[in-house]
Amino acid sequence: MKRKLIVAMLGMAASVAVVSSAHAQGRVFFASYNYSTAAQIVYGAGAGGTVGAGVNNTFTAGLWYFLGTTTLAAGGGPNMTLPTGWEQSSVTAQLSTAAPTGYFNGPIANISDYVSGPITFSIIAYNGTALNSATTTAQGNEAGFTLSSIASGVSPTGEFGAGATGFSVLPVPEPSVIALSGLGAAALMAMRRKK
């Protein structure tokens, strides 16, 4: 009886070890505070600040990731959506209140579905209560950058390293502006048909 109990306990311990190694997770320190090498998030034309200046603490940074290697162009403006195959991490960070602006120092991001191999990231920024919310007037995302692995955990210096690049936030037009633009285009087409 004791032998069966010991064998059963050893079997459970082995299966737990196998499950935990198969469901490993990676971690990155979600920060861009290393001013000498980190990329800055800046205002684009019409986004509410001096073009090229770092965004202030009214902006929130978020994290998108893709398990594997892929490309993603930098973007912004209206209707930013999570690209197919990408996931949104639950971590966010406020942009810095002190100079130099345009940088953030956030928490450790646990990527729970990461097992091994390369992973591609993109940092997003927005100034409303959420990306694409009615209160958001400017938003943007950086070009995707790939790290070969995050299995070893958080790096000593913290942030993503040389892969992260700077990007601009762009204005999100008011819904009424979009509606008026559509009406104007329809009117032009109707006038053209009459001629």
Image (spheres, rainbow, N blue to C red):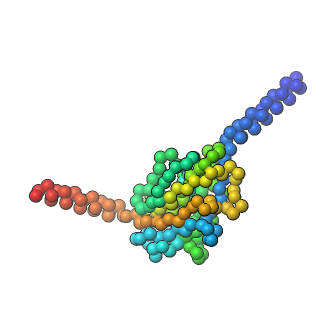
Rendered-image quadrant of the N terminus: top right
Q: Residue furthest left?
A: 195
Q: Please indicate whether residue 114 sits to the left or right of residue 86 in the image.
A: right
Q: Position of residue 75 (x, y in %)?
A: 45, 60
The residue positioned 45% from the left and 74% from the top of the image is 51
Q: Residue furthest top?
A: 1
Q: Please indicate whether residue 162 sits to the left or right of residue 50 in the image.
A: right
The residue positioned 44% from the left and 69% from the top of the image is 44
Is residue 30 in view from this perspective? no
Rendered-image quadrant of the C terminus: bottom left
Please tell me how many numbered marks the rendered image carries. Answer: 0
Q: Position of residue 46 (x, y in %)?
A: 40, 71
The residue positioned 58% from the left and 59% from the top of the image is 163
Q: Please indicate whether residue 111 sits to the left or right of residue 45 in the image.
A: right
Determine which quarter of the picture holds residue 78. Answer: bottom left
Q: Position of residue 2 (x, y in %)?
A: 89, 26
Q: Nearer the viewer, residue 70 or 180?
A: 70
Q: Position of residue 133 (x, y in %)?
A: 45, 59
Q: Residue furthest right?
A: 2
Is residue 102 in view from this perspective? yes
The residue positioned 50% from the left and 70% from the top of the image is 42
Image height of 33 relative to 83, above or below: below
Q: Nearer the viewer, residue 137 or 163?
A: 163
Image height of 86 relative to 7, above or below: below
Q: Nearer the viewer, residue 16 or 164?
A: 164
